[in-house]
Image (cartoon, rainbow, N blue to C red):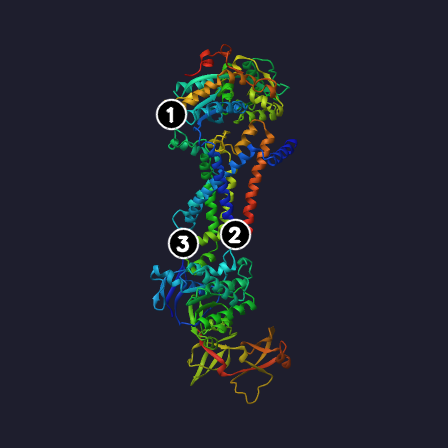
């Protein structure tokens, strides 16, 4: 009980005093996960659209597969990317391991399935009546696709938010690919909220862990509030 | 409304670029910093020693040091795949294998301390003051007899500490895989880091083997006491080595050598000797300098800079 | 001109359209009426190119609209469609109405003017900035109509546009339909299951039964002279009595209906099974045979049921077969009708519409 109270107090303290290290970790977390989310969105939305709008054999299977990958363990994604970008791996020459870029790659892959799947759901949630109306109003193929996407924008936005939430809260890939490095410069460091929490827990800094956890929740809360506000407008 | 969303996204992107810019500018105009990547074991990293001496090195050598901490097994794998320039671990047997495999060169011992067998103050197996092998044997016997409260929590994660535990079992005359592992409810594998394993042992009021550094860092939160802290086999030797540039030509071997020489330099050896005294009332490590005889390695391995 | 030539549409095992044929003239209001599920929507969707026929052709000004996929968009852009359930896009009223114009690349200024005008036509001035989803059903339907209208289509297709609306909204929509037709000469094809609406709006009506046109004609033809028993029932003729022609003397036939002999005007000959369609309002009630009446059919009967129906009273009289009659409340009071009252029903031979019973 005491620990929790102290953790809360400490979190508030760290936030109010704008503790530079905590702020840097938070900023890095947001930027890495935000970038991963943007990249994943740029892939997932078109791919989701293609899956939704085209009819092909095995479409159901593909959707099922994507939905299965929602449960992809973060460590597996991390390991997979690690094997590629580790120096002994095929992309080793890029020297990406232990960089924020590596974390972005890992998180992007991690959230791609869920964002693609939710995009498909979002698009198939657009009423047939809306589709008919668009056709009927004389939409070209491109106009049709664009406007179905537009109609599904809030649901897609929710999908993006879910992706961001999963990205910023995952630790397996981040620690394996980033290495939880605390370095002198901002972008050489790969310490983010989750890996810092993991470290601080293992060195017995329970209050700091809790504080970082609370900050993580606050970030998620702000993102969700933003999404809800947009959706309600 | 979508306009507003666009603005929000744009703002975030600009912020991101701005941050990149900020950090980027520091590098421009000067000689580019050299980067040193180190993989180390969690038990060493978690003591904070490396983050304590890191800035000194970075300033002196105009370098940036990136430290990745993982279990010894994982750290060795990073080394073997050429993902780091320097390995800092504490598992002589596997280090030897690593060097024999041609992956590592220029090993230097820079510090040591002792493992401790910790357990509840009540000490249900009665191991206090025993030799490590004897203590392990007793825990096993009492555990298998079902003496209440006798449980041993093992790291079970292939870490250096886990290796040490296995070495003790072997030295006590047991085959780890056949006699110990899975032999009964008394033996629990945590599969976690040292801190979490200690926390688990404390919750279960069980025995475990820990490096002294992590134990001291955690002691305030634990209901465990050191029961066995003497015995040659508990010796915990930390060494650093370069990844062989013959295997991975792109390795930053110059700065790797600088780092290792830095570790065995007098200044750092003194830092090591005093690190943790203010916080714990005793040092977490002993410097290797001058102690090579005591820990059974050659003087060259402790004191000769790499050339 | 729209020509429907032998159209079939098959979904799985079921033919939802069977051999549909019609010609719809430019500037005409053409109503498709028929019960739900009879295929009205399917036909409209074919005309709007949302579906393709399994067989047959839809010609617009002589061009088979389904023949050339590359001309599909061009053809579709000559039409507008209003759906039964108005689908509004999740944006403002203004943007909703602008969709078709945007698709056609109309300049923003022209869009602005058009929408300002149309908002006043549909009685939604000042609603431009409202979110369309917050509108009532009637308002949404008006927006949907405006959205189709502003593209200035040659053909406006409307699928049950008032099915879910209250009477006031229905009237508004109907007035708009008339206005669009008059002012722009738009050809309107309107599906409805409300035959009175069909009668109010349409110049010609096609009665759709089970996937095909049972009868196409003016409202008067449809209502006065339904072609068969199903049409008669659907257009609301309550008295449909089965019988057999007993004799026919120069077009005046005597028909045996459950033992009662009814005289009617028909060319059908002796022995033909028929249905007699008699409108309730053509039936006169009295307590005795009136002298001097020209009605050929006068039958004594007994009132078996009385039910108020809006401003009228609906009586069921058993005179060998059951007949429904509608009289005003006042008339009902004057007659003092009650269940069990003995009464005399009479109707003219010309009030009986005889159709052949093919069942």
Residues marked 3 and 2, same chain: no
Which is in the foreground here, disc 1 or disc 2? 2
In the rendered structure, are the residues bearing label 3 and label 2 in contact, judged by CB atoms less than 8 Å apart?
no
Q: Residues within 10 Å of mark 2 (few under 14, many from 20)?
A: few
Q: Residues within 10 Å of mark 1 (few under 14, many from 20)?
A: some
Q: Is residue B287 above or below residue C201?
A: above
- The residue at the point 56 percent across, 61 percent down is C136
* Separation of residues labelled 1 and 2 (CA atoms): 54 Å
Q: Chain of mark 3?
A: A
Q: Which disc number belongs to residue B248?
A: 1
- Of all residues, the one furthest to the bottom in this rendering is C292
Q: Position of residue B27 (x, y in %)?
A: 45, 31
What's the chain of the residue with tag 1?
B
Which residue is tagged 3?
A: A142
Query: Circle 2 sits in a helix, a strand or a loop, which is it?
Result: loop
Q: Position of residue B184 (x, y in %)?
A: 54, 23
Which residue was labeled with disc 2?
B1
Residue C134: which numbered mark, if any?
Answer: none
Within 10 Å of disc 3 (Cα), the crowding (few <14, some 14-19, many 20+) is few
Distance from Cα at disc 3 to Cα at disc 1: 51 Å
Residue A42 image-quadrant placement:
top left
């Amino acid at each position: 009980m005491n620990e929790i109270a102290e953790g809360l107090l400490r979190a508030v303290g760290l936030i109010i005093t704008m503790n530079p290290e905590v702020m840097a970790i938070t900023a890095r977390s947001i930027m890495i996960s935000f970038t991963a989310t943007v990249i994943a969105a740029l892939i997932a939305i078109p791919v989701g659209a293609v899956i939704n709008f085209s009819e092909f054999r095995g479409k159901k299977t593909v959707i099922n597969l994507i939905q299965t990958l929602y449960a992809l363990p973060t460590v597996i994604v991390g390991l997979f990317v690690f094997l590629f970008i580790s120096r002994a791996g095929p992309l080793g020459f890029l020297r990406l391991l232990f960089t924020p870029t590596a974390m972005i790659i890992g998180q992007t892959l991690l959230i791609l399935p869920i964002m693609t799947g939710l995009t498909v759901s979002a698009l198939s949630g657009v009423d047939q009546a809306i589709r008919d109306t668009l056709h009927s109003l004389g939409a070209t193929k491109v106009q049709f696709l664009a406007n179905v996407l537009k109609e599904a924008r809030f649901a897609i936005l929710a999908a993006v938010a879910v992706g961001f939430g999963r990205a910023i809260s995952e630790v397996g890939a981040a620690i394996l690919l980033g290495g939880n490095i605390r370095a002198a410069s901002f972008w050489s460091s790969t310490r983010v909220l989750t890996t810092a929490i993991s470290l601080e827990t293992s060195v017995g800094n329970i209050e700091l862990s809790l504080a970082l956890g609370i900050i993580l929740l606050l970030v998620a809360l702000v993102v969700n509030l933003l999404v809800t506000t947009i959706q309600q407008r | 409304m979508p306009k507003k969303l666009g603005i929000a996204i744009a703002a975030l992107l600009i912020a991101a670029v701005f941050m990149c810019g900020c950090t980027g500018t520091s590098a421009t105009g000067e000689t580019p910093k050299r980067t040193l990547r180190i993989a180390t074991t969690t038990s060493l990293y978690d003591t904070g020693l490396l983050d304590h001496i890191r800035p000194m090195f970075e300033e002196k050598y105009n370098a940036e040091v990136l430290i990745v901490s993982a279990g010894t097994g994982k750290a060795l794998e990073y080394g073997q795949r050429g993902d780091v320039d320097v390995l800092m671990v504490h598992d002589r047997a596997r280090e030897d294998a690593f060097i024999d495999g041609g992956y590592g060169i220029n090993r230097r011992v820079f510090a040591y301390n002792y493992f401790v067998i910790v357990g509840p103050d009540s000490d249900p197996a009665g191991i206090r003051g025993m030799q490590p092998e004897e203590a392990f044997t007793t825990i096993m016997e009492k555990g298998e007899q079902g003496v209440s409260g006798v449980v041993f929590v093992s790291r079970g994660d292939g870490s250096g500490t886990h290796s040490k535990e296995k070495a003790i079992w072997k030295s006590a005359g047991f085959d780890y895989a056949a006699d110990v592992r899975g032999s009964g409810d008394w033996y629990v594998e945590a599969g976690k880091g040292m801190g979490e394993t200690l926390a688990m042992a404390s919750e279960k009021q069980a025995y475990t083997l820990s490096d002294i550094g992590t134990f001291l860092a955690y002691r305030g939160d634990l209901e465990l006491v050191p029961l066995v802290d003497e015995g040659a086999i508990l010796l915990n030797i930390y060494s650093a080595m370069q990844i062989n540039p013959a295997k991975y030509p792109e390795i930053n071997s110059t700065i790797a050598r600088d780092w290792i020489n830095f570790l065995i330099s007098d200044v750092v050896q003194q830092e090591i000797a005093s690190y943790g005294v203010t916080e714990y009332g005793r040092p977490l490590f002993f410097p290797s300098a001058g102690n090579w005889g005591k820990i059974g390695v050659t003087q060259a391995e402790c004191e000769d800079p790499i050339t | 001109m729209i020509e429907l030539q032998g159209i079939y549409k098959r979904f799985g095992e079921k033919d939802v359209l069977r051999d549909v044929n019609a010609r719809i003239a430019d500037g005409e209001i053409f109503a498709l009426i028929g019960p739900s599920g009879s295929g009205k929507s399917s036909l409209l969707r074919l005309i709007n190119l949302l579906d393709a026929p399994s067989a047959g052709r839809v010609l617009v000004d002589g061009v088979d609209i389904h023949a050339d996929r590359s001309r599909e968009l061009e053809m579709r852009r000559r039409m507008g469609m209003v759906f039964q359930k108005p689908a509004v896009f999740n944006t403002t009223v203004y943007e909703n109405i602008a969709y078709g114009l945007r698709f056609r690349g109309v300049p923003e200024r022209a869009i602005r003017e058009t929408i300002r005008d149309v908002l006043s036509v549909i009685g939604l001035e000042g609603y431009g900035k409202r979110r369309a989803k917050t509108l009532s059903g009637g308002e949404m339907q008006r927006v949907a109509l405006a959205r189709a209208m502003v593209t200035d289509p040659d053909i406006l297709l409307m699928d049950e546009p008032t099915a879910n609306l209250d009477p006031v909204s229905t009237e508004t929509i109907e007035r708009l339909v008339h206005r669009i037709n008059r002012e722009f000469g738009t050809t309107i094809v309107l599906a409805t299951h409300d035959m009175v609406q069909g009668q109010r709006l349409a110049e010609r009506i096609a009665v759709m039964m089970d996937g095909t046109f049972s009868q196409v004609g003016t409202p008067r033809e449809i209502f006065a002279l339904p072609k068969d028993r199903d049409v008669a029932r659907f257009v609301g003729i309550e008295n449909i009595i089965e019988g057999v022609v007993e004799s026919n003397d120069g077009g005046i036939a005597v028909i045996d209906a459950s033992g009662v002999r009814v005289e009617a005007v028909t060319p059908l000959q002796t022995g033909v099974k028929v249905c007699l369609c008699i409108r309730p309002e053509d039936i006169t009630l009295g307590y005795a045979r009136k002298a001097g009446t020209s009605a050929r059919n006068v039958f004594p009967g007994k009132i078996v049921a009385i039910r108020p129906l809006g401003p009228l009273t609906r009586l069921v009289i058993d005179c060998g077969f059951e007949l429904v009659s509608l009289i005003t409340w006042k008339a009902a009071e004057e007659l003092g009708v009650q269940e069990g009252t003995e009464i005399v029903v009479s109707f003219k031979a010309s009030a009986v519409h005889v159709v052949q019973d093919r069942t």
